[in-house]
Amino acid sequence: MRIYQLSRNPKQWSEYTLYVIDHDTSDRQAKTRRVLPLVVGSDGWSGGGCASGYAVSMTLLLDYFGNEENCERKAATMGWALANRLTRVRRYSDGGRSDGWVLTEAQVSELVAEILVTAKELIQYAGEQIAIEEVCGERRDLLRQAALVETVSDRRLLK
């Protein structure tokens, strides 16, 4: 089982550290914790903010999709959507300050599935809004536009 933990540096508020904790299912005591280096820097962005959230989501997705084909493309495609959803993740607090969050691999899977379902619904909705008919092998909207141009340009028909 894998757990992702985001911790904020208490001295530098805009700096984050993303940890991956791997639990060995056969031995409850055995676990390894490692730091994932943020792959996208926030240089040139003011105070972290969106850029830091995007960096965290990209790093998390690259690790999550690490064994799959085209993991970089998948991570880049879902990076901003996951960054937006991570802002809604329940944060744990220490001393009244929000310091980060903890997500299991199953929770990350749910977030990824939510992003994919939302994208599919948006594509289906957009597909339903667009209707192009073909008449005699040509698109009807192009035929209408050509007919309109002929009608307007032929001044005899306007009188």
Image (cartoon, rainbow, N blue to C red):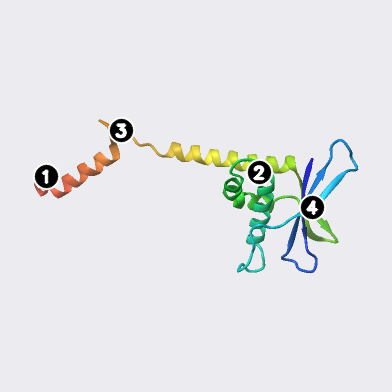
Q: Which quadrant of the structure image shows residue 74?
A: top right
Q: Name the amino acid, label 4.
A: Arg
Determine the residue positioned at 10% across, 48% down: 159
Residue 77: percent from left, percent from top? 57, 48
Tell me whether circle 1 and circle 3 mark residues in contact (CB < 8 Å).
no
**Residue 65, numbered label:** 2
Q: Depth check: 90 or 50 in front?
A: 50
Determine the residue positioned at 78% across, 46% down: 3
Residue 18: percent from left, percent from top? 75, 55
For the image, the number of numbered tags is 4
- Distance CA(mark 1)–CA(mark 3): 27 Å
Q: Depth check: 52 or 27 in front?
A: 27
Residue 30 is left or right of residue 158, and the answer is: right
Tag in front: 4 or 3: 4
Tag in front: 3 or 2: 2
Give the residue pinned by disc 4: 34
- Distance CA(mark 1)–CA(mark 4): 78 Å
Give the residue pinned by disc 3: 134
Q: Name the amino acid, label 3.
A: Glu
Residue 135: percent from left, percent from top? 27, 32
State which tag comes first along the sequence, 1 or 3. 3
- Distance CA(mark 4)–CA(mark 3): 58 Å
Residue 16: percent from left, percent from top? 74, 60
